[in-house]
């Protein structure tokens, strides 16, 4: 369905088991506009190369389903801020592969966690992340394909839990045109409150000041099982976590975010979880639910 109103496009993180195109078909079944996928196993260094037929099939089903945008989440091993040279070099090679796979598939965005500062201070980690990004993308024509930095919960020594970190990485890579993926559960766990109007306004002001709302191309719309400021990353069903529906609805209805794609990364433990959370998201936005 074309996006004729100013409501955000919505989707889920969909599985690619049995073929990457299955994520598109599942999204279509659920009445989604958009999708997030891994383009490969998210927990291994080596990825099976994409076959020509696989790519053609994905692009064909994409045409048929008109699912857009297609957001790819980078694998979890990549640590572009790694102090350890071996890990950093492997991460740069792996992320370069993610970028090339994303472009081959015709994806729109590639979401990346900035990484962990283990063994270095935050400022050095931010510098390292920016340098790694430039090396990974060296010589690649990105075109309209855009890398989005995701804010993190700040667990361990991860950078990216302050919007200033994202600002500094973006500023250090002017030729890459980096965007932002705003994760509500991560922000909340990192100490950005959303629960009452004043706190919400302060969080939005911090986003506007540091990265600008227009650079936020994706919102990871998650409730949080972890408490406010706990720096623990535990996504939860919409409305059943510590953030709650009322606060999440403020995010979903914010006119400055209507251009972004809203993606659920909520638990998929029981049949119907995705449909229920999508309807909770639709209610937050203020559009009709699907029964
Ligand atoms: Zn993520
Ligand atoms: Zn996320």
Image (cartoon, helix red, strand yellow):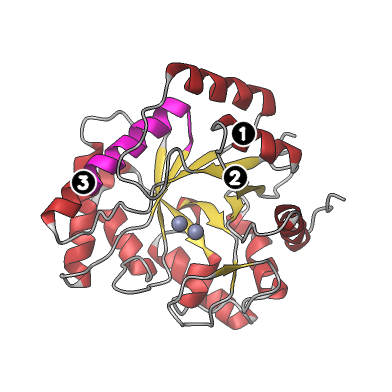
Q: CA distance from mark 3 to mark 2?
A: 27 Å
- Could you tell me which residue is drawn at 23 percent across and 45 percent down? 92
| Residue 98 counted in the magenta span | yes
Q: Is residue 206 above or below residue 26?
A: below
The residue labelled by disc 1 is: 22
The residue labelled by disc 3 is: 90
Magenta residues, as a range?
A: 91-108
Upstream in the sequence, badge 3 or badge 2?
Answer: 2
> How many residues crowd mark 2 within 10 Å: few (<14), some (14–19), many (20+)?
many
Rendering coords of residue 25 (x, y %): 67, 33
- Could you tell me which residue is drawn at 27 percent across and 65 percent down? 116
Rendering coords of residue 206 (x, y %): 45, 71
- Could you tell me which residue is drawn at 56 percent across and 20 percent down? 57
Magenta segment main secondary structure:
helix
In the picture, the disc for residue 3 is none
Upstream in the sequence, badge 1 or badge 3?
Answer: 1
Q: Find out whether the residues at labels 1 and 2 contact each other: C-beta distance under 8 Å.
A: yes
The image quadrant that residue 150 belongs to is bottom left
276 horizontally vs 82: left or right: right
The image quadrant that residue 169 belongs to is bottom left
In the picture, the disc for residue 14 is 2
Q: Is residue 261 above or below residue 269?
A: above
Tell me the element at label 2.
loop
Upstream in the sequence, badge 1 or badge 2?
Answer: 2
Tell me the element at label 3.
helix
């Amino acid at each position: 369905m074309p996006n004729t109103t100013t409501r955000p496009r919505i989707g889920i993180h969909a599985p690619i088991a049995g073929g990457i195109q299955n994520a598109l078909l599942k999204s279509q079944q659920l009445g989604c506009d958009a999708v997030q996928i891994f383009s490969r196993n998210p927990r291994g260094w080596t990825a099976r190369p994409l076959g020509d037929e696989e790519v053609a099939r994905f692009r064909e089903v994409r045409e048929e389903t008109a699912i857009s945008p297609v957001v790819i989440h980078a694998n979890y091993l990549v640590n572009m801020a790694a102090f350890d040279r071996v890990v950093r070099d492997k991460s740069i090679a792996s992320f370069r592969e993610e970028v090339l796979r994303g472009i081959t598939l015709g994806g729109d965005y590639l979401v990346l966690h900035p990484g962990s500062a283990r063994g270095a201070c935050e400022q050095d980690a931010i510098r390292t992340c920016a340098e790694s990004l430039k090396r990974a993308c060296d010589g690649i024509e990105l075109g309209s394909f855009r890398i989005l930095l995701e804010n993190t919960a700040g667990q361990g020594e991860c950078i990216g839990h302050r919007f200033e970190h994202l600002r500094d990485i973006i500023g250090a890579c002017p030729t890459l045109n980096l965007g932002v993926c705003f994760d509500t559960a991560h922000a909340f766990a990192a100490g950005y409150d959303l629960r009452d109007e004043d706190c919400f306004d302060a969080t939005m002001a911090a986003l506007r000041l540091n990265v600008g709302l227009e650079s936020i191309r994706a919102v990871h719309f998650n409730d949080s099982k972890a408490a406010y400021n706990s720096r623990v990353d535990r996504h939860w069903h919409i409305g059943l976590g510590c953030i709650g529906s009322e606060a999440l609805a403020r995010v979903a209805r914010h006119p400055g975010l209507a251009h972004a794609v809203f993606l659920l990364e909520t638990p998929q433990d029981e049949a119907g979880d995705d449909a229920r959370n999508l309807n909770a998201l639709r209610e937050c936005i203020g559009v009709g639910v699907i029964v």
